Image (spheres, grey):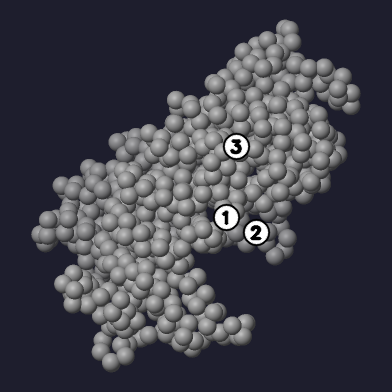
Amino acid sequence: MDPECAQLLPHVCAVLIDKRGIMTDNAILQKLLDWFRSLVSTVPVGELLEENLCIEGMLDQLMNFSFNPPNLYVFAFRLGGMLAGYEAGFRRLMAREFLDNFSAFIGMTILYEIPSVRLAWIQGLQDMLKHKDAFTFFQDSCMEVLFAFQDDKVETNAYAADELMAHIILASVQIEGWPDPEGSANLPDVALDLLNHMQQKLSDTPNNAGHCLRTLTFVFRGGTDLLVHIVWRSFFECVMILLMRKPVSDSPYIKELLSTALRFPILQSSRSMSIASLYALQTLDVAESVSFASEILKIHGCPVNLHEEARLEFLRPFCYIIKITSDCRKYPEWADVIRIVKPAFETAMASKRSSVDLICRSLGCLTDLIETRSLKKEIPECLLLDSLATLLSLCIGQAVCVLPRLELSKNMIGCQRVQRMAMDTLRCLSSWTMSTAVVQQIFRVLLLYVVDIDSDSTILKKTFQAALKWLLECSLLGNSVYWPDAVHFLNDVYKGLQKRFCSPSWEIRDTAIEFITDLVQTLKNKEVFKQAADFAVIPQQILVLVKDPESYVRASAVNCLGQLDTIYDVFLPTASGEDLTTKTLVSIFLNILSEDTDYFPRRMVMKVFVDWTRQEHIQVSYSMDDLLPKLLKVTKEDSDWEVKVHALELAGVFVDQTFDTFVADSCPYAVGLPIKGNVGGKAGALKKFNTVGLFPFLLDALSADDRMVALKACQILLSLRSKLSDGEETHSCSDGSELQGLDWLEETMRNWRREVKDGLRKALDKNWSDLLNKIDLANLETSLSKGSCSSHQKPQSLLLDIRTALWGGEEQDADCY
C-alpha cells in the first residue's frame, strides 16, 4: 500500500465508525470498496490486515449490531466477505468473531428488514466462498439463511440468492476436484445439500418453482457435460410434473431451463430431454412456446422430430395471420399448419395484451434467427414476408381480418410496439431472395407508412431504415426484375416527402431529411440510382429547411445539402431550374456559422467542411487559401467547444494535404521515395500556413479553457512539429534552454499580438518553427489526456476527501483497534 494511504487509512476507518453517522455518501463507500478490491489483488490479505489493524477494528465495531446507518452495514458485509475470500483473511476475521456476527445476521430483525443490507449479505457471502474453510462455515452457519433469502419479496435479492446457490454448487465442484481421480461421480456434500433442498421444494411447493428452476438454469450455464447430465437426471421427473400441471406455472423459467440444457450435446441425444422438450412445446404458454421453438431451431444436432415440431410451432403465429386475412390456398404445403389452430392460441389472439405480446415475441425470435443463422431451407420466406406485410397493413387499417376474428384487427390498429418490431424484422429479411410479387408487396406497405399522416416519427424512421435496406439489396442484386419496382417506389416516396417536409412536427421533418441524407450515402455510388432518382424538387425544399425554427432540423438540412453536393460534380439542380453551386452553399454555411444562435447547425456546418476537405470535394470549386482563414476567424470566437474541435480537425486535414502537395511537387521524379529532408517542400508548406493564419489559431487553441480543444490543438502541433523536423522528436530547444509551458506561450502570444497591433511587425514575420520547438508539447499532451479530474481519482485523494470533507479537517481520536 502507498505510504500516504497507509497513514490516512486509520483516520478513514475512524470516520466510518463515528457514532454521529456522518458517512452518508454511498458513492464514496463504493469507491472505497473498489479500492480495497484492487488492493487485495496485489497485496496479500494477511499482510494487509497485519499492517493495518484499523481495518479489523472498524469491522468489529460496525458488526456489533449497534445502531448504524444501513449503508455502513452494506459496506461491512461487502468488505468482510471480500477479505474472508482469502484463507488468511478468513482465519483473522474468524478469530475476531466477525464471521459469527455475519452468520447471526438473520436474527437481527431491524437489519434483516432492510433490502439493501440483505443484498449486501448475499454479495459478501459470494465473495467469501472461494476456499474449503469458507464452504465449511457456510454449511454450518449460513445455509438456512440463504434458503430464506430465496423467497425474498424483493426480486433483486431473490435473484441474487438463486445465483449464489448456483455459484456454490459450481464452486464446490471445482474446489473439491470433482470428479475425484478414481472417477467417482458423487457430488460434494454442499452441492448435494443444495440440490436436495431444491428437489424437496419443487415437490412441496410446485406453484413457487421459479427460484429453483432459475438456480438450475444458472448451474447449467456454468456446468460441465457430466455435471448437467447428473443434475438433469435428478430433476427430470420434477420438470415433467410441472409441465403436466394445467396451466403450466412458471413457463418462462421452464423454457429458459430447457433452452439452456439443450445446448449440451450429451442432453440433445437424451430421450428424457426430447420427451420434456416436445411436451413443453405443446403445454407451455403460447408466447413461451414460440420462444422455446426458436431456441430449438438454433441448435445443430438435436433430434429430427423435435426440430420439425419446433419449426411448426414457430410458424404458427405467422400462419395464423395468413389464415385470417387472405387466401390460404397460396401456400398449399403449409395448409395443415395454417388450418389447425390450438384453442390456447385462439384465446391469446383474442386479447389485446396477449396478442401483442405473442406477436412481438414471435417477431423478435424471427429477427434473432435471421441474424444467427440461415433458415432459407427450413422456413418459407414468401409466407413470412406475406405475413409481415399483412401485419403492418393491419396496424394502419389497410387490411381486415375475416369473420369471426375481427378482434385482431382492432388489437393491431395503431399499435406502435408491433409496428416497431415488424419494421425491424422486415429490414432483416431484405437479404432473402424472393419473388417479384413479394418485393412489390413490401414496397407497397413501406409506401403506405411513408404517406400515412398518423405515422409516429419513430415508426417513420424505422420505415425509412427498412426501405433503405431493401433499396440497397435491390441495387446489389443488379437484377432488372427488382430495380424497376425500387425506382417506382422512390418516385412515390419523393412525392410523399414533400408533405413530410412541411409537417408541423419537427421530428417528422428531421426524419424525412435524414432519409434523403442516408439515401445519398447508401446509394451514391450506384449509377442506376443517379439515373432513376429525380431530385428536381428535393434540394430546393431542403434549402428552405436550412432556416427551419428547430435547430435539429437546420442541422440535418445542412448535412443533407452537404451530402447532396458531393454526388454532383459542380451543382445541385433545383425546382426553379437554377443551379445551386458549391460556392453558393459555402456562402450559406458561412452565414450559419456566423449568425445561428444554436450550436447544432454550426457544428454540422464544420463537419460538412471537414468531410468536403477530406474528400477533396470543395477544392474543385473553391480555394482553401481563401476559405480557411474565414473559417478559422469565425470559429476562433465561437462559444461551442465542439465547433472549435471540428475547426481544428479541418486544420489538421489541411496540414496533411498541404505537406503531401508541396513535398510531392518539390520532388516530381521521386515517386515512392522517402520524403525526409525535402527543405523546399517544407518551405512552401510553411508559407501557405502563414498565409492562412494557421499557427496563431493553433497556438491560441492550445491555451483554450476547454480541455478537448486544447488537446486537439496539441496533437496537431505535435504532428506539425514532427513533419517540420523530418519526423524526429524534439526533446529540447535548439539553444539548449528548457522547454516552456503554457504560461510562457500565453505571454509570448500576447506580446506578438501587441506588436502586430502596433504595426511593429507583420504576422508573417514570426518564426513559428522555432516557437514550436520551445513548447513542451509532449508533457502538455500527457496532462491534457488525463483530464482535470485524474488527480481526484487517486486513492490518496479519495481517502483525503473522506477525512477532510467529512471531518471538516479536524483530527479525531476514535479507536479503531
Residue 687, image x, y percentages: 39, 77
Relative to 64, is 154 on the left or the right?
right
Q: Is residue 193 above or below residue 155?
A: below
Query: Mark 3 = which residue?
Result: 536
Residue 571, image x, y percentages: 56, 49
What amino acid type is highlighted by mark number 1?
Ser
Classed neighbour count for the residue bearing mark 1: other residues with Cα under 10 Å, few (<14), some (14–19), many (≥20): many
Judge by depth and name the residue closer to the eye, 462 or 606.
606
> Which residue shows up at 25% across the image and 64% down it?
797
The alpha-carbon separation of the residues under discs 3 and 2 comes to: 75 Å
Query: Mark 1 = which residue?
Result: 172
Judge by depth and name the residue closer to the eye, 440 or 419.
440
Quarter holding the N terminus?
bottom left
The alpha-carbon separation of the residues under discs 1 and 3 comes to: 73 Å
Residue 670, image x, y percentages: 60, 85
> Which residue shows up at 44% across the image and 77% down it?
685
The alpha-carbon separation of the residues under discs 1 and 2 comes to: 8 Å
> Which residue shows up at 35% across the image and 86% down it?
731
Instruction: Say whether disc 1 or disc 3 marks the residue closer to the N-terminus.
Output: 1
Query: Which residue reaches farthest bottom?
Result: 736
Image quadrant assignment for residue 195: top right
Query: Mark 2 = which residue?
Result: 178
What amino acid type is highlighted by mark number 2?
Trp
What amino acid type is highlighted by mark number 3?
Ala
Residue 457, image x, y percentages: 51, 30
Q: Can residue 50 be seen?
A: no
Judge by depth and name the residue closer to the eye, 275 or 323.
323
Instruction: Say whether disc 3 or disc 2 marks the residue closer to the N-terminus.
Output: 2
Classed neighbour count for the residue bearing mark 2: other residues with Cα under 10 Å, few (<14), some (14–19), many (≥20): some
Quarter holding the C terminus?
bottom left
Relative to 384, is 754 on the left or the right?
left
